[in-house]
Image: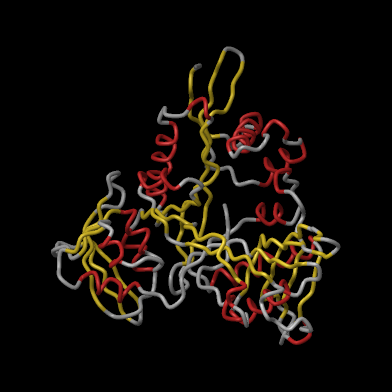
Amino acid sequence: MGELEMRGVSGDREATDAWVRAVVAGFLDRGADLSREELDARYARQELSRARGFFEKDGDRERCVATFNSLPQRLTTVGGAQLVAAGVSGVTVTVTHRRRGLLSRLMERELREARERGDALASLIAAEYRIYGRYGFGPATSFVNWRVNTRRAGLDERWSPAEVDGTLALVEDAEAREVLPGLHRRFRAVTAGAVSRDDFHWDRVTGRVPVASEGTRPLWAVYRDGAGVVRGLAGFAVEKDWDRGMPDATARVRTFYAEDDAVERALWRLLFSLDWVSVVDTGRARPDSTLPLMLPDARAATVAEVADFLWLRPLDVPAMLAARSYAAEGELVLEVRDPMGLANGRFLLTAGTDGASCAPTTRSAELTLDVGALGRLYLGDDSAARLLAGGLLSEETNGATARADLLLHTGRRPWCPDIF
């Protein structure tokens, strides 16, 4: 092993290229095969101001053996408020350099810097469940992947897109690129758990930036209301197949945003009406989607996967708890434990219908939990009663768990459909 050095890559073209190749290889794609066009696009457009890695010097050669990035991000909390977050991304450690503490050093440095910047929390999408709990992250949203047998669903095959209140149309990549940012901002404003996306992301998903590992280009279905405003969009790819002379294709949804449930149903209905398609794979759909309710035979929608998705790591507990809305009025004293010392303390939450406040307190704790458990509870996708039963929090005052669930409960579950 050669000498290892942690450093940032922003502004250093050679280091950036090595870092990008290491990220791609770390996710088991062929980093060495990245085209100059893709590397140029990433250098010019990808947010790398906080990207850093470990570089190994071996004589005259240098290679990147661990990568880490943090994206400036805004998270929508319950009630629609936006919180500043550090979106952790691009985390890899080369297999030859595992078990040397490289990820821990990268993560701890970023979390401390994020706290100093004033970020309320950190977020990430966990590719592996067992890694991130030790850094104080907890799963805060989930998704359901349905496979819908359209031939069994019982929907009227004579349905026409003209029957919806707005209009539905298939569009090209360029038009999808034009409408996606505005649609996503409106979608994010009404969806707890949604996160902001930058221009580089939209360029990638619509093909403006070539990404060799992303496969077949999707088709785009757009829903516009009566005023011509785009209120929903679905991006999907079709895998064609034939069964004894009969079309038997599968449509796989890659991108799906709808501002309300009526728009969501209209987009699903379009997908279920595609010629040649007998199965629609919904991808990472919202966990409480109304999709099965629209099917005459709800059993046509079988669950292929249920999984956690967005993970949160509290950094500023008062800012987090004061920002969201609550289902009832009340007070709760939380003892938050954080081995890193970034978010630990005892806090009084005072929730009301016109807002909330949260501040350090000397009052006796009513619930005691670690930062990862608070991340689980924050958006309302888990319950304090469940965490108590699982040994992930302790109740110091009788009834405090029930009061926490009364306050934190949400009518619709949070959802984050976006990988970052």
Report the front residue among 95 and 91.
95
Residue at the spot 73% in from the left edge and 33% down from the top edge: 33
- Between 400 and 275, which is closer to the camera in this rendering? 275
Please state the total of marks drawn on the protein image.
0
107 relative to 208, above or below: above
Whether residue 266 is situated above or below residue 121 in the rendered picture: below
Residue 39: image location, x then y, percent: 71, 38
Q: Quadrant of residue 284?
A: bottom right
The image quarter containing residue 213 is top right
Tell me how the rendering is colored.
secondary structure
Position of 321 compared to 125: left or right?
left
Quarter holding residue 317: bottom left
Can you name the residue that lies furthest to the front here?
244
Q: Is residue 330 above or below residue 218?
A: below
Q: Residue furthest right?
A: 245
Point 72% across, 85% down: residue: 164
Left or right, 207 with reference to 365: right
**Residue at the image point whose x is 15% and y is 63% from the top:** 396
Measured as percent of width and height from the top left, residue 139 is found at 42, 56
Percent of width and height locating residue 224: 73, 78
Residue 229 pos. (x, y %)? 71, 78
Q: Residue at x 73, y 68 (%)?
A: 278
